[in-house]
Amino acid sequence: MIIRRWSAGILAAALFVPGLTACNNSPAAEPAAGGAAAPAAPADPKEALLASTRELSKGNFTFAISGGEFDGSGTVHMPSKSAEMKMTGGDAATEDFSMDMHLVFIDTESWVKLDLTGPMVDAIPGAKERKGKYQHLDRSKIKDAKDLQFDFSDVDPAGSEALTKAVTDVRKTGEGTYEGTLDATKVTDSDVLDADIVKGLADKAGAVPFTAKLDAQGRLVEFLVKVPAAGSAKAQDLKVTYADYGAATAVPQPPANLVVEASDDVYEMFKG
């Protein structure tokens, strides 16, 4: 799932992207699952950040991504092999469109609900008729549509492990809080910093400021990248938060009465 890659331009061409209303987006510390005491963060700041993402690999958490044009959040629940994402963005009152998108993944099955509002919607075939409907996706037709897929072998859509590995300088600023810089050119597979943002930073990409917060068990609960202004692009804060470690819930299948089969134009919209 490539959350931050989408743009209004893609939507106009046929569809930017990562919100999950069902998840707890608070970065507050959570107790370890089952009451077990997780190890504290290592004393070395860099090692603490690297260790903070290990719990994510268990695939039982909620997350949220904010900043930029669109915001997203989600749930990952490996015990039931399910995941869910919702994304929102735009403002139909002041822009050409607004978008509310809900993706549901349960084992090998997936669904997408894409509700669009605004003048641009009239140019998108079937958009109004499908509003409020979950479109069941044919796996054989989404091989070239990464935005409609979820990899259960790589369960962190935000790619925070990649962010921590790219840290070049870090210092502890308080209990569980850190700040420093990272080399954005070394970040891969992260929806917080995508290739377009890195390219736009040019010579500023080598030292991008960040802050991070860990909970009492040393698990990452917030990572904020302070992207500086570059060229015509304004400065922006891109943030991912995590919560509910070990306490996420299984994602339910969409109600049968709201499910339709996805049309061919939906697959075309997300190709590439």
Image (cartoon, rainbow, N blue to C red):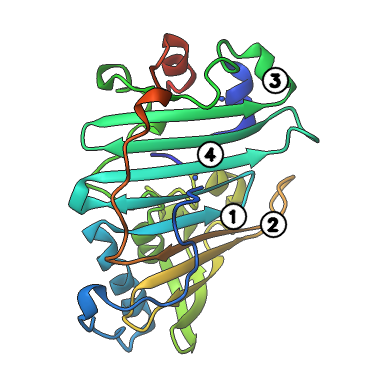
The amino acid pointed to by label 3 is Met
Rounded to the nearest angstrom, the CA distance separating label 2 from label 3 is: 28 Å
Give the CA distance from mark 1 to mark 4.
Answer: 26 Å
Left or right, 93 with respect to 147, comes to right
Q: Disc 1 versus disc 2: distance between alpha carbons? A: 15 Å
Q: Position of residue 38 (x, y in %)?
A: 23, 81
Which of marks 4 and 1 precedes in the sequence? 4
Name which residue lies at 47% across and 49% down: 20
- Element at badge 2? loop
Q: Which residue is labeled 3 in the image? A: 120
The residue under the point 72% across, 25% down is: 118
Q: Secondary structure at mark 1?
A: helix
- Which of the 4 image quadrants contains residue 107? top left
- Horizontal side of 12 relative to 94 (left or right) equals left
Residue that numbered label 1 is attached to: 203
Residue found at x 38% / y 44%: 84
**Circle 1: residue type:** Asp
Labelled disc at residue 17: 4
